[in-house]
């Protein structure tokens, strides 16, 4: 059984098959009609263009295709095709869709339209649309006591839930990646467990479970190779996690409760300099080093700590020598 998750396993072909079957609901409550069947050919060409342009994951192609579908529907509502839209139309679309990174996606679509038609109009619109830089938000993280309390609370609720939190935390993997594991993806050796993450938003990679390997071994005991390690859907575990979160008395304002485990682990490994930047990218499945900047505010606080730690053994001697020189200079010797 292939388990689906909100951030994994998005298939562009599924969207193409349902291209003209479902209406589009925008975040502002407005409903757009499904785009015409004829417009699907443009969508197919767009997907093929993306595939030839770079190493786009299915998740990214799906997201770009979603926006293209909305734009085409919006144009057809005004009895236009996407090729008829001008700069003003695209600005209205940006304002109406009001979605994260909408300008970035629209610029990708405009590049496709220019490559397809060689119409200079699309290049000019591309140049005029500015990408709004998002202010980077401080990431939520937990401390060691929080993690310990959460695991204990999960153990009182459900053993499988306990192991899931342990594995997501220690590996720093996305919860959807861990929920996609079958028994054949987990190998045990003298060091603990090696997990092969085959279904991901990024790339195939292998990570280790050492701290909680015994719990994972117990959970995997008796499973066939094709069996799912974790039996339930994402929403089931999210509901259980919220229950454990409350039981452990953790901060209420944290929204993405599974993802904060990933943030916490990344912060710990970066703070302790366990892995290099390149190794961090491979371990967490980051395609660019930009994600490392998310944790810069945390590591800066450690710079001072490490600086002082290096100097503290010499501080007293330096101060004593400074005082001696001052006294000698004042003629008090």
Image (cartoon, grey):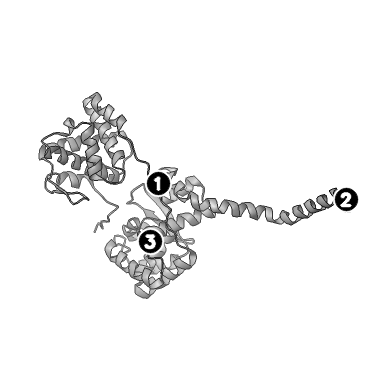
Asked if one can make out residue 35 in the rendered structure from this viewpoint, the answer is yes
Near mark 2 (Cα within 10 A), the count class, few <14, some 14-19 or many ≥20, is: few
Counting residues from the N terminus, which is met first, the one under dot 3 or under dot 1?
1
**Residue at 52% over, 52% down:** 299
Q: Position of residue 1 (x, y in %)?
A: 24, 59
Q: Is residue 73 left or right of 103 when viewed as pictured?
A: left
Q: Please, which residue is most extreme toward the bottom here? A: 156
Q: Are marks 3 and 2 in contact (CB under 8 Å)?
A: no
Q: Is residue 280 left or right of 62 when viewed as pictured?
A: right
Asked if one can make out residue 233 in the rendered structure from this viewpoint, the answer is no
Q: Position of residue 272 (x, y in %)?
A: 54, 55
Q: For numbered disc 2, what is the local secondary structure?
A: loop
| Mark 3–mark 2 distance (CA, rounded to whole Å) | 62 Å
Counting residues from the N terminus, which is met first, the one under dot 1 or under dot 2?
1
| Mark 3–mark 1 distance (CA, rounded to whole Å) | 18 Å
Near mark 1 (Cα within 10 A), the count class, few <14, some 14-19 or many ≥20, is: few
Q: For numbered disc 1, what is the local secondary structure?
A: loop
How many marks the image carries: the answer is 3
| Nearest the eye: 113 or 226 | 113
- Residue at the spot of label 1: 135
Q: Position of residue 193 (x, y in %)?
A: 43, 60
- Residue at the spot of label 3: 254
Q: For numbered disc 3, what is the local secondary structure?
A: loop
**Residue at 44% over, 70% down:** 149
- Residue at the spot of label 2: 331
Counting residues from the N terminus, which is met first, the one under dot 3 or under dot 2?
3
**Foreground mark, 3 or 2?**
2
**Residue at 75% over, 54% down:** 319
| Mark 1–mark 2 distance (CA, rounded to whole Å) | 58 Å
| Nearest the eye: 130 or 262 | 130
């Amino acid at each position: 059984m292939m388990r689906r998750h909100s951030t994994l396993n998005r298939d562009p072909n599924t969207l193409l098959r349902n291209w003209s079957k479902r209406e589009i609901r925008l975040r502002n409550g407005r409903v757009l009609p499904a785009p015409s069947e004829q417009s699907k050919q443009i969508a197919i060409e767009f997907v093929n263009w993306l595939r030839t342009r770079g190493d786009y994951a299915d998740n990214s192609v799906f997201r770009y295709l979603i926006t293209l579908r909305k734009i085409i529907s919006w144009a057809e509502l005004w009895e236009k095709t996407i090729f008829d839209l001008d700069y003003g139309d695209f600005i209205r679309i940006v304002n109406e869709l009001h979605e994260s990174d909408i300008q970035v996606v629209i610029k990708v679509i405009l590049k496709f339209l220019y490559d397809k038609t060689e119409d200079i109009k699309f290049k000019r619109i591309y140049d005029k649309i500015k990408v709004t830089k998002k202010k980077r938000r401080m990431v939520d993280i937990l401390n060691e006591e929080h993690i310990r309390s959460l695991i204990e609370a999960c153990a009182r609720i459900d053993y499988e839930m306990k192991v899931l939190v342990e594995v997501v935390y220690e590996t720093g993997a996305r919860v959807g990646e861990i929920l996609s594991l079958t028994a054949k993806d987990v190998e045990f050796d003298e060091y603990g467990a090696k997990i092969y993450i085959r279904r991901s938003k990024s790339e195939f990679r292998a990570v280790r479970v050492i701290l909680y390997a015994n719990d994972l071994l117990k959970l995997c005991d008796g499973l066939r190779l094709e069996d799912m390690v974790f039996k339930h859907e994402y929403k089931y575990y999210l509901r259980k996690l919220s229950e454990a979160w409350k039981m452990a008395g953790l901060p209420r304002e944290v929204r993405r409760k599974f993802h904060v485990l990933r943030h916490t682990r990344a912060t710990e490994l970066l703070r302790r300099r366990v892995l290099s930047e390149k190794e961090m990218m491979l371990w967490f499945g980051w395609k660019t080093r930009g994600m490392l900047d998310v944790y810069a505010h945390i590591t800066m606080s450690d710079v001072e700590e490490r600086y002082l730690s290096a100097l503290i053994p010499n501080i007293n001697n330096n101060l004593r020598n400074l005082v001696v020189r001052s006294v000698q200079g004042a003629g008090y010797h």
